[in-house]
Amino acid sequence: MNIAEAIVRELIEGGIGTVYGLPGVQNDPFYDALFNARDHIGSVHARHEQGSAYMALGAAMATGRPQCCCLVPGPGFLNGAAAFATAYSANARVLCLIGQISTDQIGKRNGALHDIVDQSGILATFTKWSARVERPEDAVPLIREAFRQLNTGRPRPVGLEIPTDLWLKATPAGALPPPVPARQDLLAGDGDLSRAAQILHSATSPLIIVGGGAAESPDQVRALAEMLNAPVLSFRMGRGVLDARHPLAISPPVAHRLWPDVDVVLGIGTRMQLPMNTWGRDDALSVIRLEIDDDEMNRFGPPTVGLRGDVADTLPRLISSLQAIGPRTADAPPLVRMREEAAKAQAVKISPQLEFLAAIREELGEDGILVDEMTQVGYVARLALPVYQPRTFVSNGYQGTLGWGYPTALGVAHAHPTKRVVSISGDGGFLFGAQELSTAVHFGIPLVAVVFNDGHYGNVKRFQKENFGGRHIAVELSNPDFVQFAESFGALALRAHTADELRSALKEAFAARRPTLIEVPVGEFPSPFEFILLPRNRGAR
């Protein structure tokens, strides 16, 4: 085989069903090999490298499985960089397959097409592992190592560069690799598990916090919460790990009220950034962390007990250790009342956003997927949208990548063609990637985009209003007629002014099963940030 053919074979064997990307002179041989293997692996091309990278990100986040994005070097690679950085922050398994200039030109700065200074160094900044093929015989071992990195340890992007002069070089393909073995060094010790179980069993006011690392273990999280009678907090990445309708599921405002009295907090696959970095801690709080990554374990100071391991492997063992101690009889706090009070306070202050979200929630159904965005309805969704299952609320986490929503949601919808998928954006963020309406129509991806149009970068305008005496700069926008704009691509285009009209438009869009844009003209939304940016309430500053 040549290297291009060998890489395609390894992608197929690694479970990659689609390559998202754009062809060009430095990766054309790879795309030719994809063509020859088209009965086994697909190709989706977007209208912008950024869109391709976001689609791979969305597919990875929605499925939890590795996805591949292939781009040319230099500007093509840099166009995808925001998506790759978001994949890093969101713990997504994205294989960044990047072209490179000819091996005899790398590092010489001779002005070769698409040459940039130290592309390898840039790639390394937002991948957990990256390499460059320098000899034909290295190609297969390196792509196999890329898959090993994707499938073990903390989920994060990996990168592999292949110079343009090597694609067609013959390479020893070798036998197919055996399945990737479990990482035995990622199993938490029995002593640590016993100590954690004793602390949890003795707790009077325990709290569980779940992040994206718990997405594959919802049943175990529920069982542990019920065993401890402990409330479970999720925000952004952990939404849906515990069904929002469960009596122990709580949002940040409720957790913030509980926080001063919590004596033991268990973080499961989460940075715990919100309480540990913002709400504060003191010596009376015991911290137990279940993390796959040592680097994350001590992020906000050393935990009382650190359980280093995969959540799916470790959580059942922790539950068994608790069961061995015996039943626990501590009462839960009055969560029903506290949840009702929080909901009433939000209904008073942010009812417009809540009404739109209620319409979306109703029409999505049990397993529909919402992809959020840096917009007012998206901010509220992170704390107030009921989420029922893991990976059905897709958020960019701490990266805050404006404009990610629509192209990422395209990847989600492509990976889950039978599910209802909704992308919510503001008019500012949507136009970062609006050209991907063409991609949706070309590939028949039935994504429904809801665009809340206020004619501004609304959150920036609010910040300027509140902090700079109402002086506004660089926030006003001139928009197209979004309905005509979407129709020009061949998409279904609708307009809704109220939550009831949005509900009706969503029904029509889901019935049509075609790419759809729903414009929602709005004014200034009330601020949701008093429910999100909660103040310190524990420990010395």
Image: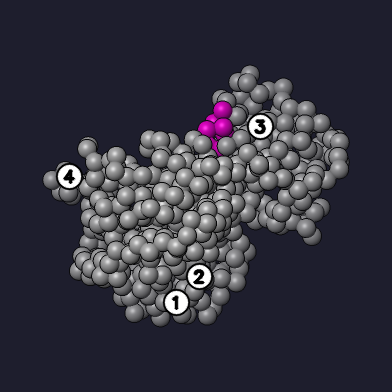
In the image, which residues are magenta? 121-127
How far from the left and from the top, in percent, is residue 361? 41, 72
Q: Earlier in the sequence, mark 1 or mark 2?
A: 1
Q: Nearer the viewer, residue 486 or 13?
A: 13
Query: Residue shown at 24%/45% (left/top)?
Result: 538
Q: Main secondary structure of the magenta part?
A: helix
* Residue at far left of view: 469
Crowding around mark 4 (Cα neighbors within 10 Å: few <14, some 14 to 19, many 20+) is few
Q: Residue at x 71, y 54 (%)?
A: 15
Rendered residue at 33%/65% (across/down): 331
Q: Which residue is mark 3?
A: 131
- Mark 1 secondary-structure assignment: helix
Looking at the rendered structure, the kind of residue marked 4 is Asn
Which of the marked residues, 4 or 3, is nearer the chain's N terminus?
3
Check disc 2 and give the amino acid type.
Gly
Q: Are marks 1 and 2 in contact (CB under 8 Å)?
A: yes
Q: State the image coordinates of residue 210 (x, y, percent, origin top left).
A: 44, 54
Proximity of marks 2 and 3: CB atoms separated by less than 8 Å: no
- Counting other residues with Cα less than 10 Å from the Cα at mark 3, is it few (<14), some (14-19), or many (20 or more)? some
Q: Which residue is mark 4?
A: 467
Q: Are marks 4 and 3 in contact (CB under 8 Å)?
A: no
The CA distance from mark 4 to mark 2 is 38 Å
